[in-house]
Image (cartoon, grey):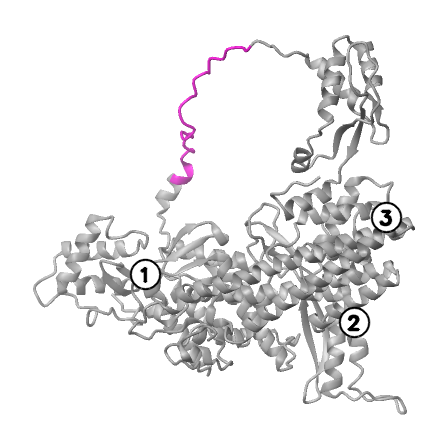
Amino acid sequence: MTDHAGAGHPPHRTGPGAEGGSGGAVTPADAADAARLVAFGLQPKLGPAREPDYAALLRRYLEDPPFARLADAVATGLGLVVLEVSTRAGMAVTAGEDSVFAVRMGDYARRAAADSADRFLHGLAHLAVAAMAFPRPEDLADDGYLGRITVNGVESFVRQACRRLEERAARQGENTDPSSDAPGLEAAWRVYARRSATGATKDARRLAASTTGIVGKAVSFLTDSGFLQRTGDEGGGSYRTTARYQLQVRDLAGTAAMTELLELGVVPVADGTATLLPPEEPDPVAESGLPYPV
Amino acid sequence: MAPPNLSVVTTHVTAAGGAAPGPRAPGGPRTAPGPAADEGLARRLRALACTAPLHDLDARKANLAGEYGVYAMAEIALAAIDLVTLAMDFDTGADHEQVVARLLPRVAAQTPHRPAAEHERVARWVLESLINVGSVDRGFRAVYGTFAPDGSYVRRDYDFKLIEEVPAPGGGICLRTTDEAVNVLVGALDTDVTSAQIAAEVKLEVLISRGRLADAQLAAEQARYRTVQYSETLRRALEATRRNVRAVDWLRTVPDLIGEALDHIADRYRHENAILTNIRRARDEAEDPEHKLRAAELVDIVQDCIRRHTRLQSRLLEAGPLFRAEQDRQAFAPPSGRAGLDLYGQLLAPVLALPVARAGRVTDAFFARATGHRSPGAVRLADLTELLLTPPAPREHLGAELPEPDLVATPDDSRFTEEQFGAATELLTLPPDAPRRLSGLLAEARRRDPGLPYLVALMAVHAASPPVGTAYRQGESRLLFAVDDGTELADPEFGGADLIVATALLDTAAMATARADHPEEPQP
């Protein structure tokens, strides 16, 4: 068994890979139970509350440390990262970077494999969904928080952010039109702003290449992953987040993206309470904590 | 039909600009490639590029299968941009089909002898070309050159849209014109909105007082475009407020904006009512029928301005409560002990500002870990073979067979037969320019069938109070009506007034637009 998903250690347990607990020999039945628990964890839409077997295995994981180590080892061996094991989130596992369970961009959207702009837009859509679902740092940290988003809301939120960057560039008198010879140097917001928000198609579906189509794809994918739940049709489809999504964004995706950003030499300043504020504008209102006119 | 893809509009600026850095012929004037001069040039090149799609329409019409050379495509395109701009309001834009419907009269006027299907094809082609259906971004790109600070010549891409498709509140799609298109349309609109509007209205008053209504109409139309643009600015600000209280400066900027806008509305409202009174007088006193018509159109335009102001005002009044509700929701939530990651401020906003090649690395990292996992399909060849060879299961979800309903024939007790209805309808299908007397209709009906006059008389009496509301809602193109001009009816069987029965033609396109604007108030 090779440990090729060493990126994340399960939070509750020390070192995976222990072949047997200190409290006695492992029977094949134990291994089967541990694998069954991981298999339940691989079905993100399945909640422990609805499946008595799942709940029993979870209880065993929480009460029986050798069994817990065994289940962690099974998950690690499959190339999975254990995010959290609790009655709230169930056995929250996710794919390690090179795992067979990982989602590849090329499988996710065919165009994205060839076109770097499309690839960026699909990634950005996922980042924007998370940012809109957890608008403040507190929301991401608070375990009881349920984010609510709509497809059109996410789309116009990013468009607004792009517009603000455009206005800032215009104020500074920059010529942001990219050089024809080096399209990679084009500012990222321009790629989004240029793409049309929506479009009519011959068969009344969403235009897949429009930004609304891209955000719509992201949320329906996340819904299939058990990260979002559809709550209605308003605003192009409204959704709320699940505990798993919060874990995934907080413990894994957010950190990974931050690391990448820091490697690029961009150090975003954070004071721990900052929210959707344009960072370049000093705003006395936010500092006072009372964002209304006095 | 497959119009050629128009994703790249290339303005050939390289011929003029490309020669600039090279050594000039001796004695020739040398333009200084300074950044200031260059910036102005770039701005003008971009403005020029915005008109390129319109010129391009006339250039490309030769490629359409058929004889389309006679159509003035640029004219239709400008009319389309006009229509979309005027339909823009706070939430809505123009409906695609309505724009096509309202374009048709102009297209038809260009070639009255051609079939209507061809007119519609031209209108659709122009509108779709303006949206640029077929390109990935649904927009246009022009290439122009500038000098970098180090003196080197750089080619740049300028991306723009003329008409864009945005989500409509009802879940559909509507069209809006972009700022670029408004600038192409009216020109030099990129000025201070408020002062430009005041100037236009002062001009209007002077023009009316001097009786120059043709110019007055032009000025009023321009004032209306500015009103639309002003609403658009405010709409964006309010939208941002709804999304996040803190993203907008509610200490100074927004209250100032709202205050200014409310003052502006109060001022304009007074002003436009005064203008309205003046033009109404001009309309009623005008002798020249053309002046009368112009003044009547002007009344419509000013009324439309007032309507837009009222709508803007109601939005402004909602802004305060909206802010307070969002404030309650967002700011007074209990603070959490843990400080987390600020996804917008620390990730999204910095990423958007990066060059796309580097930003892609961050979004890739986020994507790889935020999407969770997918279980890969594992297929055994044996299963696959069996699966492929299994005949499809018969559909059973159609449900149980429905029992044959036991129907009882209802006795036919109608007073008139189908043939009589057909004959009466045929008799009353009058050409719009030839109304008839009821007496004549009754006599003709009596010649055909002794029972028919009763039905004709009944339908004529119904037509005295025509179902205007129904015709309006259903978008009918013609309506039968009857009026009493005081003549007595001389008939052996019937008494009363000898009604004049006539057919009215209805403006379906205008009704469709009015229905979309005010779904609840039918108006004839």
Q: Quadrant of residue B477?
A: top right
Q: Position of residue B35 (x, y in %)?
A: 71, 86
Residue at (66% x, 62% y) in the render:
B139
Q: Position of residue B253 (x, y in %)?
A: 55, 74
Residue at (72% x, 63% y) in the render:
B271
- Horizontal arrangement in the rendering, residue A116 relative to residue A21 (left or right): right
**Number of numbered callouts drawn:** 3
Q: Quadrant of the N terminus of chain A?
A: bottom left
Q: Tell me, yes or no, whether dots 3 and 2 are on the same chain.
A: yes
Q: Nearer the viewer, residue B302 or B241?
A: B302
User: According to the image, label 1 marks what residue?
Assistant: A244
Residue that protrudes farthest toward the right in the picture = B288
Question: Could you tell me what secondary structure mostly forms the magenta stretch?
Answer: loop
Give the mark, 3 or 2, whose residue is nearer the N terminus: 2
User: According to the image, label 3 marks what residue?
Assistant: B110
Q: Residues within 10 Å of mark 1 (few under 14, many from 20)?
A: many
Q: Which residues are magenta?
A: B387-410
Q: Is residue B140 visible?
A: no
How much space separates mark 1 and mark 2, taking CA atoms? 54 Å
In the rendered image, residue B396 lying in the magenta stretch gets the answer yes
Tag nearer the camera, 3 or 1: 3
Tag nearer the camera, 3 or 2: 3
User: According to the image, label 2 marks what residue?
Assistant: B12
Q: Quadrant of residue A94?
A: bottom left
The type of residue carrying mark 3 is Gln
Q: Tell me, yes or no, whether dots 3 and 1 are on the same chain.
A: no
Q: Nearer the viewer, residue A241 or B393?
A: A241
